[in-house]
Image (cartoon, rainbow, N blue to C red):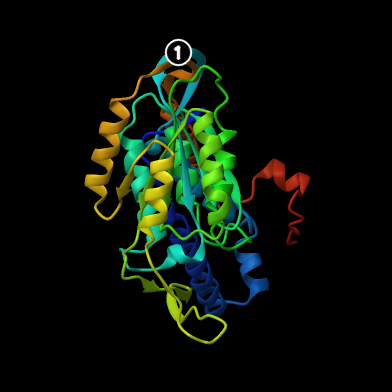
Amino acid sequence: MVQLDDKTYFYLLFIIPVLVLLYVAVLFWKRRTQQKFADTQLMQRLAPDRSKYKGTLKLLFFILGITMLILGLVNPKIGSELETVKREGVDIVFAVDVSKSMLAEDIAPNRLEKAKRLVSEIINQLASDRIGIIAYAGQAYPQLPITTDYGAAKMFLQSMNTDMLTSQGTAINEAIDLASTYYDDEEQTNRVLFIISDGEDHAEGTTLSAVEEAVEKGILIYTIGVGQAKGAPIPIKRNGIVESLKRDAQGEVVITKLNEEVLLEIADEGNGSYIDGANTETAVEIIKEELLQMDKKEFEAKQFAEYKDQFQWFLAGGFLLLFMELFVLDRKTKWLKKLNLFNEKQVE
């Protein structure tokens, strides 16, 4: 397992293409200048030992050296030991609505980004709970199984978008049914499902049945509403620019509204509660208090320990490559010249 101390140093890698462009520009300038001074055959006679390829080799050493130094600043760490630790917590599954209605911008920047931020902030408040993530629209898709790796959870969370599922619509029952398969510990006393949605449900007839089945399995269902009751149109964008608004079969602009009634009913039947997600800080605080009041179950989790710094190897490699670059001369190497590895013709 690898950890990176400071990823911001990766921005320094943008220096490399700049260096390559500068090298190409200087090489072009030198050739034009030489052509003004003498033709190619005369230059070969004046400087017969000049190598055509040593300049590129020097540049390669220099770029590799700079890259290694940058990686040294990032300081990769490797977990050298996998150990099993005892933890106490709750199994939590987040079901995030990724239907097109979540693109509505009645809550900044839009409903989906708001939902992702809510989940991310909730994860920040967790200590030893296990979490899983589900994406759903017309169908449900397992995004991340139950895990204690919060970093991986956030990575998968940020990759979620409204194009990840081809089946559009909003089937909350599908998300609840899939979430029921996430809890693999039969003795787990507290199983929690958070449904983050605008409340649109195209399978209302079967949703409450799915809720009842989940409750029988000991799952508490909380709902978090994102959006506003007055609603908003659904923008259709390309490259971040709004091209049009979604319209129905009659050509009318579709206005999608937050349906709190559906979310309230699901939470009530699921022995949980409905939480307004308009204010992130308030919503996260309410959820934190709810989780603190729940009984915790002890479980085992595997994690890497004893992360060791690896920056010294990258720094050593970087300085070695830069040192080698200093000793690569533009002249042909005699023994390489005899081997003629680069097919460089000797001028008689």
Residue at (54% x, 86% y) in the render: 250
Q: Amino acid at mark 1?
A: Val
Residue at (61% x, 53% y) in the render: 139
Residue at (49% x, 33% y) in the render: 215
Residue 136: x and y, percent?
Answer: 54, 52
Work out whether 55 lies above or below 149.
below
Residue at (34% x, 61% y) in the render: 227
Snapshot quadrant of residue 190: top left
Residue 214: x and y, percent?
Answer: 53, 35
Describe residue 124's horizontal placement relative to residue 316 as left or right: left
Work out whether 197 lies above or below 338.
below
Residue sitting nearer the eye, 297 or 66: 297
10 Å crowding of disc 1: few (<14), some (14-19), many (20+): few
Q: Secondary structure at mark 1?
A: strand
Residue sitting nearer the eye, 79 or 139: 139
Describe residue 322's horizontal placement relative to residue 117 as left or right: right
Residue 234: x and y, percent?
Answer: 44, 73
Label total for image: 1
Residue 272: x and y, percent?
Answer: 37, 38
To which residue does mark 1 refer?
85
The C terminus appears in which quarter of the rendering? Answer: bottom right
Work out whether 196 lies above or below 243.
above
